[in-house]
Image: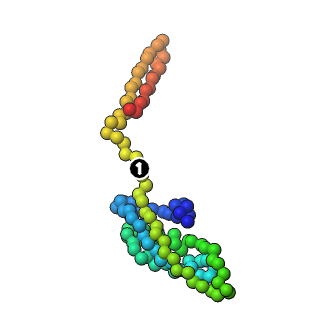
Amino acid sequence: MRAFIKMNLRYPEEALKNNVEGTVSVAYEIDHLGNVIDAKIKGGIGHGCDEEAMRLARMLKFGVPKHKGLRVTFHKTINIHFRLPAIPKPSSNTQLVYSYVEKKKEGKASYNYNISVN
């Protein structure tokens, strides 16, 4: 289930802009065929994360065991974690060095470019 959520989770744009992280708890019901028929937010964080958690919960599909021929509804809860993607920050020691050398020989020009990051 973690792999499914990781693959299908789309971080909401509003949450990215506001640096929102947290966990959304979703209670859902599964019918006798394994389909999610109802989902409700038990604990949310807003900024579009609640709606995304609901969308993911409704996409779930389960294999349901037989209960003596009865049609049983299962009640489950899932916690969906929203963590901001790690963005590497450049260190203050990073430098970009650019040098340009022009050589003229017999009416022809040649150029050397050296670019290095320290």
The percent coordinates of residue 118 (x first, y second) are 38, 32
The percent coordinates of residue 45 (x first, y second) are 37, 69
Residue nearest the observer in this picture, 98 or 77: 77
In the image, residue 71 sits, relative to residue 99, either above or below, namely: below
Q: How many marks?
A: 1
**Three-letter code for the amino acid on which mark 1 is drawn:** Ile
Residue nearest the observer in this picture, 113 or 70: 70
Residue nearest the observer in this picture, 79 or 39: 79
Which residue is farthest bottom? 70
- The 10 Å Cα crowd at callout 1, few under 14, some 14 to 19, many 20 or more, is few
Could you tell me which quadrant the N terminus lies in?
A: bottom right
Q: Quadrant of residue 72?
A: bottom right
The percent coordinates of residue 20 (x first, y second) are 36, 62
Q: Is residue 86 visible?
A: yes
Q: Quadrant of residue 116?
A: top left
Q: Residue at x 64, y 78 (%)?
A: 65
Which residue is farthest left? 92
Q: Residue at x 47, y 20 (%)?
A: 110
Classify mark 1: helix, strand or loop.
loop
Q: Residue at x 66, y 81 (%)?
A: 66
Q: Residue at x 56, y 71 (%)?
A: 59
The percent coordinates of residue 36 (x first, y second) are 56, 77
The residue singled out by tag 1 in the image is 87
Which residue is farthest top? 106
Which residue is farthest right? 69
Q: Is residue 55 visible?
A: no
